[in-house]
Image: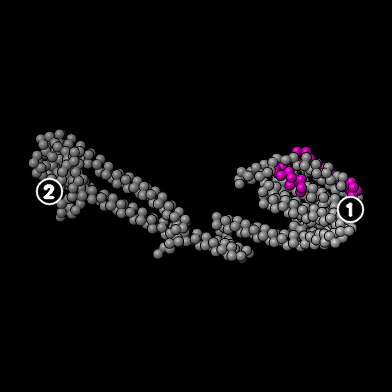
Amino acid sequence: MIPASLLRSSTFRLAMLFLCVFGASALLLLYFIYWTTAGFMERQTVATITAEIQGLRDRYELLGLAGLIQVINERISDKENRDSLYLLAKPDYSPLAGNLDQWPEVELSESGWLTFTLAAPRRRQEMAMARHFLLTGNFHLLVGRNISEKTDIQRRIIKSLFYGLALAVVLGLAGGVFMSRKMLRRLDVINKTSLEIMAGNFSRRIPVKGTGDEFDQLIANLNEMLDQNERLMGGVRQVSDNIAHDLRSPLTRMRNRLELALMETSNLTLCQEALARTVEETDEIIQTFNALLQIAQAESGAKRGDMTRLDLTAIARDIGELYEPSAEEKDLAMTMELDHGATVMGNRHLLSQAMANLLDNAIKYTPAGGRVLLRIRNTPQGPECTVADTGPGIPPEARDKVLERFFRLESSRSAPGSGLGLSLVAAVARLHRAGLSLASHQPDDPQRPGLEAVIRFPRLAELKKGREQA
């Protein structure tokens, strides 16, 4: 008994559709085989009888009735012509010669052909096919062939075709049921795992069989999507915790400062200082939320539709000129090495913000007398944007962590900032399908190894090809 769920499945319906198409094709093929086989045998029989009649008619015209009777008797006695049938009859159809006892009691067709059953016991229920020819003098000549063997062959062919078609239907149905059960089992695994994940078990993953088929590819993509969703949810939880932790202190200070200002109404200077500090910390909080919003926009891909063809060199020049005064004020040597014609597909605002964050970090953490480098290069793999400094750098074990939101090194906790600068740079790089790498700028100087941040953009041709494939 086939389960109702199996009958309702799309895989079973698809298998039945293929079975119908295959059955129709097989039926046409089998009909063609039957038509060519049976038709060939019938045409061969007709041609043989027609040739014999023509030959006997010629003998009759040449040798007369006696000669025709002699030829018929000779052919009857020939063992090779045992399937041949002859009957020469008078005008009243009474037999003169031949191996048929009487004229067949069947109606002649307009073309003179007739099919009849040979009488028992000489020939038990055997079929014959013959043609009637009227000779001069109103003598009747009937020449035919015993087609019982050919009829048996045709019957066997029809029977074989029927059984073959029935077997194909049965095998197709069994194959459809087997394939449907197999696919449903794999789909059931996916559905059960999905229900467990929906119930809250976010670490659950769909098992891969390792066959490398379409289901394995689908499951691998689903697992990767689930991993990404789990990472994003973990990031949301982490961001929520970090926001609550990092904003609680400034908000508490703001509240205490405002309470103090309310109590010290007689001291206008103290109130103004408290309000000024409150405004500064409010601006820092707003900047933190703006950075979070930019990161969220970059990670969601919402800005991908705003991408245009941009001159990366021009953007770097504008950002570099904007930060040159800050570098000079801190007694830093700032250098710009900009190749011309570095073109990327991107969002101008986000790219400018990413470069600004890298330059701001480089200037902030590089001590006086150090160097800062902003470089744009055209490489065979695509444009590169590099910001390097001679500051304390980032230890190798922490270079992945600094790309997370709100992560700050112990040495930089006293410096102003929210720990979102490099997170935004990483999000902007991913949005532009670019790679971000952090390394030591001066690995031979352990005291001041510096930091070299490189964003490697893909070539425009690769981006165009990727969009066409997508």
Q: Nearer the viewer, residue 74 or 225?
A: 225
Give left or right: position of 195 versus 59. Answer: right
Question: Residue 218: horizontal and vertical position, in percent?
Answer: 57, 56
Residue 405 seen in this snapshot = yes
Question: Residue 429: horizontal and vertical position, in percent?
Answer: 72, 49
Whether residue 71 is in magenta: the answer is no
Question: Residue 425: horizontal and vertical position, in percent?
Answer: 75, 51
Look at mark 1 in the image and give the residue it sits on.
367
Q: Residue at x 70, y 59 (%)?
A: 235
Give left or right: position of 118 versus 375. Answer: left
Element on which disc 2 rests: loop
* First in residue order: circle 2 vs circle 1: 2
Categorize mark 1 by other alpha carbons within 10 Å: few (<14), some (14-19), many (20+).
Answer: some
Look at mark 2 in the image and give the residue it sits on.
101
Magenta-tinted stretch: 327-354
Residue 382 seen in this snapshot = no
